[in-house]
Amino acid sequence: MLRVKRLNKNHDRKGFDCGDKHLNEFLQKHARQHAQRNISRTFVLIDDDAPQAIVGYYRLTVCEVVPGNIPDPRLHNYPNPLPASKLARLAVNMQKQRRGFGELLLIDAMQRSMSIAENAGLVGMFVDAKDERAAAYYSRYGLIPLENNRLQLYLPISTIRQTFEM
């Protein structure tokens, strides 16, 4: 059975390879330190048959955004800045890519963002795509590119809520 858990010291970070040096390096060298310092949280997708092996991961943090930069005119009269969650990284092991695991991780990040919004308040979730291909991937799930930076995308919390109410 697949499940998403917070990264811990028992997970095999060194055995993870998504094909991107920077994404591998973050998981292997920085993810646990960020968690210990309360900077961000890293969540890993694991299979109960091999619970130390990491199928994929994402990093979730919070951020503040300027309402004028968000492609949602309803927010332009809101106070400045606004709270949001940020999906800062998402990667799947090369041997497991193109099987829907990235989608499972994205859905989990959306659910966690919705939970944060219910408990503390967020206007939405932002994503920093590493390139145009990644931005196109996120766009398929309804994330909207920002006008001033097409590699930064936004998903309103109302859209996330509607997704899970269906």
Image (cartoon, rainbow, N blue to C red):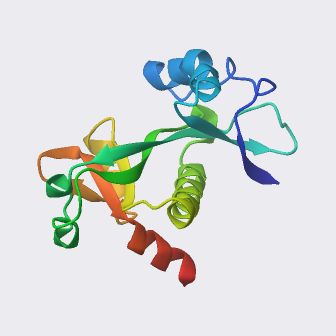
Image quadrant assignment for residue 112: bottom right
* Res 32 visible: yes
How many numbered discs, if any?
A: 0
Whether residue 101 is situated above or below residue 36 in the rendered picture: below
- Residue 22 appears left or right of 14: left
Q: Residue furthest right?
A: 49
Q: Residue furthest front?
A: 79
- Residue 73 appears left or right of 124: left
Image coords of residue 108 (percent x, y): 60, 56
Image quadrant assignment for residue 144: bottom left
Closer to us: 127 or 132: 127
Residue at figure coordinates x 55%, y 40% from the top left: 58
Whether residue 149 is situated above or below residue 119 in the rendered picture: above
- Residue 20 appears left or right of 129: right
Residue at figure coordinates x 33%, y 45% from the top left: 64
Quadrant where the N terminus sits is: bottom right
Whether residue 72 is situated above or below residue 34 in the rendered picture: below
Residue at figure coordinates x 52%, y 17% from the top left: 25
Image coords of residue 40 (percent x, y): 54, 34
* Res 99 visible: no
Image quadrant assignment for residue 50: top right
